[in-house]
Image (cartoon, rainbow, N blue to C red):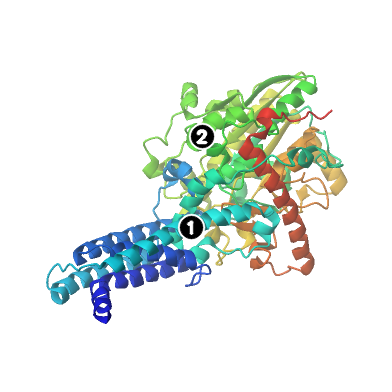
Amino acid sequence: MNERIKKFFKFNMLVFIYSICAILMELISICFTDCKPYLTKPVYPLVLFSLILLILFLFKSVKTKVTICSILLFAQVVLNVGFVYLYDSNGTYFEWAMINQRNDAFGTIEDLSLRWSLLTILMTIFVIYLIGSILTIKFFYKKDTKHKTYKLTKIIISSLLAICSIFIVLNPTISAIQSSKQSYVDRFLYSDATSKYQQLGISSNAIYETINGTIVDNLVKHDNKGIEKFIYEDENALLATSPYFGISKDNNLIYILVESFEWYVFLENCTPEQSQILYPNLNKFFSDSIYADNFYAREKTDTSEMLALLGSNPTGKYTNYDFPNNSFDWSLPNLFKEHVKNNGKDLVQIKSFHQNNGDFYNRNTLHENLGFEQLIDIEEMKEFGLVDTWKGNREKGQRTLDSETMLKMKDEMFPDTDSTNQYMTFWLTFSMHGHYKDRKILKPYYDKLDSVGAYPEGKGTKGDYLRTYAATVMDFDKALGIMMEKLEQNGDLENTTIVMFADHNTYYNNLSYYAKDIDERYNSELYRVPFMIYDQKLKTQYELNEGTNKISKFTTTSDMLPTILDIFGINGYKNLYYGTSMFVKNVESVIFSRAYGIFVTDKLICFGANDLLYKSSDFTKDDYESFLSRAETLLTKQEYLDKIYYNDYFKNHPLRKIS
């Protein structure tokens, strides 16, 4: 028996060395995602590695074993480097739902900013194993040695193989079923949540999430229990309203998602004199608007877009790919249509605009079901004379400019109106979308930057990225000027509400860290971005009441839609929206980002109540208690809203109209 064991270890020596290399690669890789070099839930990855080893044990040829081990190690290098890049580029962990967005993700890649140090380390381990294995076979085994696997050994290995395989599938399945029986409050807020990669590592998390997104997704169902009571039966079922409820009810609505917009570019990182020259329209818009100084966004574009139009998102999937054909009775476009009708006016149009392909994020399908008459994308814009500089020039980042889009599309975006009609326009900008390599199309803006000595060239890679970003904001500033001039010519400035918001910070190339001079991964200031409302009637009354044009309380992207409903005098059911109107005092929201797995306020970032990642210098116990209360409210809403999304609830139960 001892002799058999010795032979077994001898013929599988390189397999065991492979396992050491694989584990070492995994622990090194997670350190590049802000984790420590250990796993908090090691059982699943250990069983997964055991499964691989058991399969390798069954091969008789040493060369075959080494070949497979080498392929697996190389695949691990590619997988780990790729997922670390994903984490670096936007802070997300891999989950199966991302597969639907793979084409969109590839479309945004211009600068493959890999962690070359990680790639070097992993490739070094791989090459050492490969060379070591070749030399071992040549000098230790002498030839392609094959060994006999005894019947008892085969039975033991096969039995263990079956047990491991069952565990790999059953563990996430059972965990998901158990989790589905928990409330979201217990599951997300009070669980021992940490980074997914700290728990399982990168490779095993990929397997775990794949099983979750395929097998488990078909097993765990969301019932309709309690939805009616959740929406309608609370004595305060309607959204809270402010003193400004209905002040803008007769206005047109222009809603602008400004890609990767940041305060710092025109308010902080250049002098006031430079800013007035470079960004005259933004400065004027800022001074003429009500702005939220404490507004935060921590989501990717598609999620922020849905928060803007729906006020919510499913926690386990993406609306644009998983539920594009749902009935969205509570969406802003659908409610705005009803509002115009109830207001005794005619709806001129309700359209969305984006100078990218309409199938990006599946908007062609989704926007129609949200209530838009039409999404006018780059293909339709060509009919208005707009040139698509993005198509065919993706490697150069020559995105179709906002200013050119506005110049060609302004008449379509902003039709003439009078006291008998209204319209809604939703525009997604494009110029500021990262990455931020030098773009020839921006040369006039670079020249203007140089003329005033702002954002100079040659300050290193990040400095040059910031320079390009500053130039893209100048292009949006130009577009803003064209829009305001058009509205003034139409005579519509007084009867138009313009809501402008950033979908997220400049996370591409980690530019926010550089521009804001922040070193740590988690800091709430990274996610503080612009939100402004231009509305002459509203601003006059707000300044009269508050003595300022600033909203100081903590607000988020989930508060935008309730704010618009508030000022337009549109009632909504509060549990269908994560947030509350920004004009309602003493009520604040909280961010729970499913994509990033974190809660965010202006004073705190955490995975859960028991794992705080960041606290501001003035963070108090009262802040913590307030966070817990707000998070519990949000998660309760999310639990029921998931049922609504997953079951397409309003398809068979239309939303009750509010009298």
The one nearer the camera, 554 or 226, is 226
Q: How many marks?
A: 2
**Dividing the picture into quarters, in which one does residue 29 lie?**
bottom left
User: Which residue is drawn at the image coordinates 37% and 39% (left, top)?
Assistant: 393
Q: Position of residue 322 (x, y in %)?
A: 54, 38
User: Which residue is drawn at the image coordinates 41% and 62% (left, top)?
Assistant: 48
User: Which residue is drawn at the image coordinates 42% and 50% (left, top)?
Assistant: 437
Secondary structure beneath disc 2?
helix
* Placement of 400 over or under 160, stated as above or below: above
User: Which residue is drawn at the image coordinates 51% and 34% (left, top)?
Assistant: 362
Q: Position of residue 76 (x, y in %)?
A: 36, 60
Any part of residue 486 in sight: yes
Q: Are marks 1 and 2 in contact (CB under 8 Å)?
A: no
Any part of residue 281 in sight: no
- Residue 5 vs residue 519: left or right? left
What amino acid is found at the position of numbered circle 2 in the picture? Answer: Asn
Q: Quadrant of the N terminus?
A: bottom left
* Placement of 595 over or under 387, stated as above or below: below
Task: Name the residue furthest left.
Answer: 143
Q: Which residue is mark 1?
A: 87
Q: Position of residue 289 (x, y in %)?
A: 73, 42
Q: Quadrant of the C terminus?
A: top right
The one nearer the camera, 33 or 263, is 33
Q: Earlier in the sequence, mark 1 or mark 2?
A: 1
- Residue 412 vs residue 151: left or right? right
The one nearer the camera, 449 or 624, is 624
Q: Position of residue 39 (x, y in %)?
A: 50, 69
* Badge number at residue 556: none
Secondary structure beneath disc 1?
helix
Q: Which residue is mark 2?
A: 362
Gap between marks 1 and 2 measured at Cα? 24 Å
